[in-house]
Amino acid sequence: MAQVMSANPTAWFTVTELAKMLGHSGGAVGNACETLLHRGEAVRQGIKPRMYQANTATAHAARTSPTPPNTPSPTPSVPRPSAAPQPLTTAPSGRPKPVSRPNGHHYHPRSLANLPDVEALQRLRGANVPVLLYGPPGTGKTSLIEAAFPDLITVAGDGDTTVGDLIGEYTQSTNGGYEFVYGPLITAMQEGRALLLDDATLISPKVLAALYPAMDGRRQIQVKAHKGETITATEGFYVIAGHNPGVHGAVLTEALASRFSMQIQVGSDYDLAAALKINRTAVRIARNLATLQQAGDTGWAPQLRELIAFQKITDVLGEETAFANLVGIAPLEDRDTVAEIVTKATGRTVTALALGRQL
C-alpha cells in the first residue's frame, strides 16, 4: 500500500483501485489505508469514495515493516497544503505567467474586475465573499479554482451526495469497532482551507442545508451524528462552488444562490485556444457556434476542453477524423446544425464519426 502511494506521490487512490493493483480484498485494503492515515503516513479526502494520497511520511512507511495489530504508534503531524497563494509573475509582455495546478498542469489567468482572475478570487476569499462560478462544462471553472487555492478540498457533487459525504460518518476501524470519520466540510473548517462544491446544483437542497450555518455569521455546524458536537470554522475557511446550468438536474435554488454573494459566468477562452496552436478552423467553428448558442439558435458549442481533445485527435488520427468526431460529440438535437457549420468551414461534407466497412 505505502509502496504504491509513495511511488506515485501526487496521485489520489480509491480503495477499489488499490485493491485491484495489489490483488487483495477491498476490506483489507481499506483497513490498511486507515491504519496509514491514523499513523500520519497518508492523507485522505472524501467519503464516497474515500481517496488516499502519500505524504512526506509515506516513503518511510514503505521502507519499514508494518506495525503489529493493536500496537500503539506515535502520530506525526501530517503536513497540510499551504493556503498561501502562488505569487503571480508577469511575462515581458506584461501578461501574468501561467499558474501551476496540483496536477502539474498550468492555468492561464484571464481578466476579472481589471485583475487576473486568480488574484481576484484570492482577494474575495480574504474578504470572505463566497463565489459561484457558472458556465458549461469544460470552460475552466475547476482549473481556475485549483490555481487560486493551493489548499483546496473538492467535493464532487451529484444527486447521490449525502449529508454524511459532507460532514462525515461512522466507519469501521482496524480493531473491528466503529469511529466517526470527519468529512471534507469539517476538515476544511478545522484546517482553515478552501472547499469547492463542484456541480453544487446537482446536490439535494436538503443536503446543502447542512452547509449553510458554516457559511453565515455563525460559521459553525452541529454534528448531530457525533454526539451533537459543535464545529467552529478556523480562519481561512472558505466555500466556493461550481454550477453547470445546462446539465440535466442542475437546479440553482434561491437558498443556494443567496449564499453566494458573487456569481461569475465562465465561458471558454477561445483566444487561449488559438494561443495553444489549436487548429484555427476548429477554433473559428467553436466561436461561431458559441455566438449561435448565445442567440438561442443552438444549444451546444465546443468548449476549450473539446478543442484540446480535437487537437490531440488531429495529431493521432488526422484532421478529417477530428472534424468528424467534433460533429459526433454534439448533442443529437444540435448535430445537424454543427455538421452544416463544419461542412461550410472545411469545404467538404462532414458527418459524425462512425465505423466503416470490414477490412
Image (tube, rainbow, N blue to C red):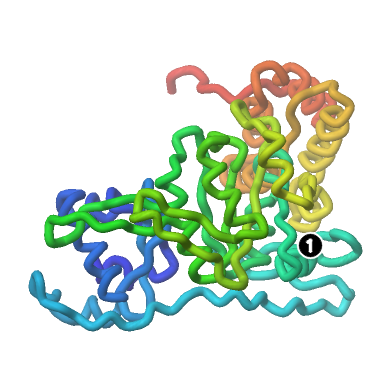
Residue sitting at 40 percent across and 59 percent down? 229
The answer to whether 38 appears left or right of 241 in the picture is left
The C terminus sits in image quarter:
top left
Q: Is residue 174 above or below residue 136?
A: below
Describe residue 4's horizontal placement relative to residue 71 as left or right.
Answer: right
| Image position of 128 (left or right of 325) | right
Q: Under tag 1, what secondary structure?
A: helix
Asked which quadrant contains residue 179, the reply is: bottom left
**In the image shown, does 90 or 183 lie closer to the viewer?**
183
**Residue 126 against residue 298 in the figure, above or below:** below
Q: Position of residue 221 (x, y in %)?
A: 51, 55
- Residue 64 lies, in percent from the top left, at 17, 81
Along the line of sight, the residue nearer the viewer: 44 or 8:
44
Read off the residue under disc 1.
Answer: 117
Quadrant occupied by the N terminus? bottom left
At a point 79% along the width and 65% down the height, the residue shown is: 120
**Residue closer to the observer: 126 or 217:** 217
Q: Nearer the viewer, residue 201 or 104?
A: 201
Residue at 75% x, 25% y is 299
For mark 1, does the 10 Å Cα neighbourhood hold few (<14), some (14 to 19), or many (20 or more) residues? some
Of the residues shown, which amino acid type is indicated by label 1?
A: Asp
Q: Residue at x 81, y 25 (%)?
A: 341
| Residue 166 at least partly seen | yes
Snapshot quadrant of residue 3:
bottom left
The extreme front residue here reads 228
Q: Give the percent coordinates (x, y) of residue 107.
A: 69, 63
Q: Is residue 22 visible?
A: no
Tally the marks: 1
Spot occupied by residue 100 in the image (x, y as percentages of width and height)? 63, 70
